[in-house]
Image: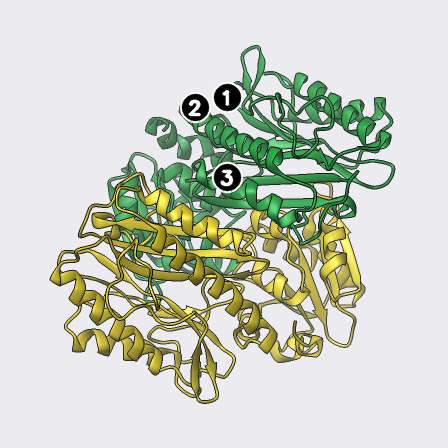
Chain colours: A green, B yellow
Amino acid sequence: MRSNEKLLSLPELAGVDALVAMSPENFAYVSGTFILTVELLRPRQAYAVLAKDSDPVLVVCSIETTLAQEETWIDDIRSYTEFKDEPIDALVSVLKEKGLALGKIGIDLSYLPYNSYALLVDRLPDAEIVDTTDAVATMRGVKTREEVTKIESATQITHRSVIEAMATGRLGETEKTMADRIITGLIERGAEGSLFGVFSSGERTRMPHAMPSDRVPKVSEIIRFDVGGRFGPWKSDFARTYSTGKPTDIQRDFYRNLREVQEETIASVRPGAKAEDVFFACKDEFEKREMGFHMPHVGHGFGIELHENPMLRPGDETILKEGMVLNVEPFGFDENGIGYHLEDLLVVTEGGNRLLTLGLAPTELPVIGKPLDQQ
Amino acid sequence: MRSNEKLLSLPELAGVDALVAMSPENFAYVSGTFILTVELLRPRQAYAVLAKDSDPVLVVCSIETTLAQEETWIDDIRSYTEFKDEPIDALVSVLKEKGLALGKIGIDLSYLPYNSYALLVDRLPDAEIVDTTDAVATMRGVKTREEVTKIESATQITHRSVIEAMATGRLGETEKTMADRIITGLIERGAEGSLFGVFSSGERTRMPHAMPSDRVPKVSEIIRFDVGGRFGPWKSDFARTYSTGKPTDIQRDFYRNLREVQEETIASVRPGAKAEDVFFACKDEFEKREMGFHMPHVGHGFGIELHENPMLRPGDETILKEGMVLNVEPFGFDENGIGYHLEDLLVVTEGGNRLLTLGLAPTELPVIGKPLDQQ
């Protein structure tokens, strides 16, 4: 999946004696094992410990040992017994064994709950505890070819499921029925499960993250959705906007403009540009077309975490590099307050970028229930 | 959903001037609004602030304001702009406005990341910050009638989907195909999405949390799964064990024993018993039958969080009360190391308990592809 040497360089890169990856995303990335309960049952913490000049160690709940053995590249796996042992104590044993009771220990302080931090400091009063959330996240940001392939496959499965679901959708169906078709299609095409499924129509599109309801969309309404699936540790995140038929001029024009904005914004993504440059490019395109611009960000790094660094937002001066995978997702409201959203995934390449979705959205507002040549 | 007076009593119950509910589960419970991104995008924190003798306040990311307005019982909703504002600063403004800069503030220190805690202490150096994770979790533990109805519906949808999926399953299909049928059935019957879908067969049942693979189960093998869906903030969590046909004597006997253990364990659940009593009852039943017992817990409170208090484990002396909703889930390995698992949901009632699943598992090891009268 990635070179272990790269991972083993993390303590040095982060300037620490040992780096402990323990947020669900950082743990999955460093350990190479995807333990769903690390995310779903937060007290069941797991740690990937990379100490300088020493063999890496994994610490997991005993229940998960067999799964970890099956998947991780790390030979030395320790376990603790849930409820009987404090997970932090199992981590502290490893750190002490490595002679690091006085060392500089990096850990995910953007994730580690305060209670666990307090225990860690209590057990290692003379160690220096620093935050290395971003050191791991930054390494995660640049994907290997194998990682891009996995993310591309997840995205294309999602896109394909959307195209088929919306071609099958009919007036008279509820939001829930149409949303279910996307989500079940995703799973039948390979996702292990759904991650989220935002789906709304008409007035409900004002809410950025409305769940599908029993509302039956009427003719001349907008349908907007943003869906994602789980593919092991990898995810998908994809948004499109449709019409139920007979769109109004306002709808047609707003969509056409947003679709142009999406194309122009994506054209601004290239190695050497800053993350915030893409934000400002998008903002300019909105303003050129006199569309209200209200987004705190216009996209984000993507892969294991739903929003990864870099964020396409003002103030993020990360220089874009080949291998970064980004979602670009302009979102706007027309003069009636109806929401429109398009989201595509791309990878930064030497010459600019390459789309990982099957293609940009149709240039004209697509209508449900009609086969679409190009979506 | 529940009486607001009960929620408003939380600061008094917890002995604090203000209680801030902010773990995804505690926030959903106190606010009455389910914002998926609070869970999926951890930096997008949201807070439900209950201050003594004062009106409650909700603090959410501006993107989620419209959704919160639609769902919450709290009138006063404040927002912050992502990336521009620190969420903690928006919380601190509210606390200062309530005159609590010197107050005793309860917050979810089992969830609040250390970095956010450090900011909070920096902004409110003279406040006393204490942990109130459990105060809210304890209140969540006893469900109202309306809450039980929602959880019961989620469980029965899940159970029904399992029965139909396994009656349809055939030898020659992969684990993934059979698992997909359960998950898509769940969604088509009302879940908004899947929460998890553990599914394994044969040797793979040794791993407690294996994801479905492309393995094709052979005849005379065990299939074991543990699945759950999302129903707004509510969840389901349900496990069963099947055979692919022609079970061996070892399989038949082990299953029969586990099924008896499940019935006896559930019979021990009644108001006044301690949580750990149920654990020991289960352990006794295993030992009586000379089955190896390896579980750190045999079940758990359930509802909004996958594992809620009380936990059916040694040391949890919580007295069971009417309205508590518990999963009971004995898990064992036969002499060949093959895993078996049964999980049912119940609510503690005045006279003992009432099953929320459609019924206990069949008394004899069920076989895929055969319609089952009683599952």
Vertical arrangement, residue B85 with respect to residue B251, above or below: above
The x and y percentages for residue B42 are 58, 48
Comparing A198 with B286, the one in front is A198
Vertical arrangement, residue A287 with respect to residue A231, above or below: above
- Circle 2 chain: A
Q: Disc 2 vs disc 1: Cβ atoms closer than 8 Å?
A: yes
Q: Disc 1 vs disc 3: Cβ atoms closer than 8 Å?
A: no
The residue tagged 1 is A323
**Mark number displayed over residue A185:** 3
Left or right position of A133 against A197: left
The x and y percentages for residue B134 are 53, 71
What amino acid is at disc 1? Answer: Gly
Comparing A154 with A21, the one in front is A154
Q: Quadrant of residue A123?
A: bottom left
Q: Residue at x 41, y 48 (%)?
A: B181
Query: Sequence-wise, which precedes: disc 2 or disc 1?
Result: 2
Helix, strand or loop at mark 2:
loop
Q: Nearer the viewer, mark 2 or mark 3?
A: 3
